[in-house]
Amino acid sequence: MKKLHPNIVQLLADIEAYRALSGEDRTAFGLGAVNDGNFISRVEHGRQPSFSTIDRVYRYIEVRTKAVHRKAARR
């Protein structure tokens, strides 16, 4: 496997932390965030996402995390 840039390692860690919180699987995350069900796998194998793609991922995580917390608060 290709050695990943530390920022990409952090991106993947942030994605995994979100997925652990939300229970969302890898495919659903990729489709929801960037319309690519294989996004996580591609990045893990060396694909370098653009800055705009990284921004989309973090905006998706931010919005969805708020939704997860709102849903949990209603229970």
Image (cartoon, helix red, strand yellow):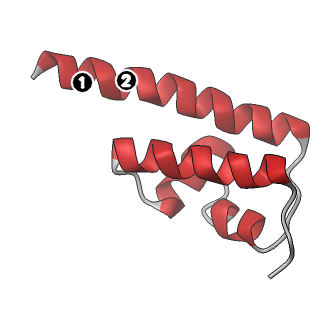
Provide residue 75's location: percent of width, then percent of height: 9, 23
Camera-side residue of 44 and 39:
44
Q: What element carries label 1?
A: helix
Quadrant in which residue 53 is drawn:
top right
- Cα–Cα gap, marks 1 and 2: 6 Å
Name the residue rendered at 66%, 32% in the picture.
58
Q: Position of 2 compared to 60: left or right?
A: right
Camera-side residue of 12 and 74:
12
How packed mark 2 is, by other alpha carbons closer than 10 Å (few <14, some 14-19, many 20 or more), is few
Provide residue 12's location: percent of width, then percent of height: 65, 53
Q: Mark 2 points at which residue?
A: 67
The dot on residue 40 is none
Name the residue rendered at 55%, 33% in the picture.
61
Q: Mark 1 points at which residue?
A: 71
Q: Please, what is the three-letter code of the amino acid marked with disc 2? A: Ala
Name the residue rendered at 43%, 59% in the picture.
25
Provide residue 74's location: percent of width, then percent of height: 14, 17
Name the residue rendered at 78%, 74% in the picture.
45
Camera-side residue of 41 and 6:
6
Spot the residue most to the front. Answer: 6
- Look at the picture and state if 62 lies above or below 7: above
Q: Are the residues flagged by discs 1 and 2 in contact, CB closer than 8 Å?
A: yes
Provide residue 27's location: percent of width, then percent of height: 52, 62
